[in-house]
Amino acid sequence: MNFDNWFCKILKRLAIRKKLQPKERISKLVEAKKMRLPTVKSGSVIGREHLRLKRNNQDSVCTGSVRVGDKTYYYGVICDGCSGRNATATHNEVGAQLMAYFAVKEITSMLLMGSTISHIAGSLYNRCLGYLHAIASLTSSGNPQESVPFISNYLCCTIIGFVMDNESAVIFSAGDGVIVINDQINHINQNDHPFYLGLSLVDPRFLALDSNELPRMFCTQEFKINNINRFAICTDGITNTAIEKIFGLNGPHGGPLGLGRKLKVLALREEQFTDDCTVITVEFDEADAPAPELETEEAAKEKQAEINA
């Protein structure tokens, strides 16, 4: 045996022994990467004024998640139907229910087709508008005297939603609502005249509006989630004093339906929700990622035998 072959065998034996060192195993386990796991909850409670007028809850909420490749996406949408400004009840909870369901299904479809979260909102706006237009066209004639009342009584709702991957989140909205990121509260205030997506279906002449006043896309806010402990999207029925009470729920309010129960308890005992109140919360926990696979002692011994052969 020449010196080169002998030296190579020594190096291989040292490599096997290094794999068997317990300290090496421990360090690999300790260095397992951390991944952030979101907990998404949603809930809704009818407002006191709607109870008094014997109206339905005008809000709707849908959430979902989907895994595409090595990423898991989470998303949710809240819609708030227009309640009207007089004693005549509208039925815009119909549009709110349809729109929330449709928007979540479209988000799922776009993600499965490879869309990034940064591009979801732009495409979703046009799809939602097309969906409302299809409903209006199939249900009412093109005569404004028929189509305008149908749209205003059935299809007018605000939209606020989010879509999130492992690194970032995007919140999008059309109309009023409330966004909470960590301890920062942002009220989207439109002076009680929120923009309803359905208004884009109506000739501006019937709205006493300039066509330039109507938005042509969602308002969006994108942020990294690495320094975010929690965020929430809400309808404008939420109160500032209630916001802190919707996070960190446990005990009887700790399950998937816990947020809805909590809102109902708040409405009965502590808060006066004049309007319907609907919320989606996202809170982050940390968990160890799966530890890297380590070579078993049996496999190492087999390699040792091959080297010695």
Image (cartoon, helix red, strand yellow):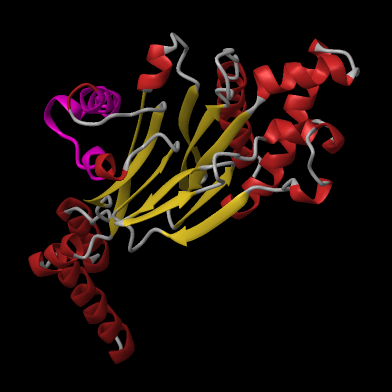
Please tell me whether residue 84 is drawn above or below residue 41 in the rendered image. above
- Give left or right: position of 97 versus 305: right
Q: Position of residue 233 (x, y in %)?
A: 42, 42
Q: Is residue 165 visible?
A: no
Q: Which of 188 and 169 lies nearest the eye of the viewer?
A: 188
Q: Which of 116 and 231 lies nearest the eye of the viewer?
A: 231
Name the residue at 57% across, 44% down: 173
Q: Which of 229 and 91 lies nearest the eye of the viewer?
A: 91
Name the residue at 58% across, 53% down: 220
- Give left or right: position of 271 versus 78: left
Quadrant of the rendering where the N terminus is positioned: bottom left
Residue 263 located within the stretch drawn in magenta = yes
- Magenta stretch, overall SS: helix
Please tell me whether residue 138 is drawn above or below residue 303 in the rendered image. above
Name the residue at 50% across, 44% down: 162
Q: Position of residue 151 (x, y in %)?
A: 73, 21
Please tell me whether residue 7 is drawn above or below residue 163 in the rendered image. below
- Residue furthest top as drawn: 54
- Residue furthest bottom as drawn: 3
- Residue furthest left as drawn: 22
- Residue furthest right as drawn: 143
Q: Which of 27 and 14 lies nearest the eye of the viewer?
A: 27
Q: Is residue 162 visible?
A: yes
Residue 23 quadrant: bottom left
Q: Position of residue 150 (x, y in %)?
A: 74, 16
Residue 92 located within the stretch drawn in magenta = no
Quadrant of the rendering where the C terminus is positioned: bottom left
- Give left or right: position of 172 versus 294: right
Q: Position of residue 214 (x, y in %)?
A: 74, 45
Residue 144 quadrant: top right
Write the start and end of the magenta stretch as one range: 244-267
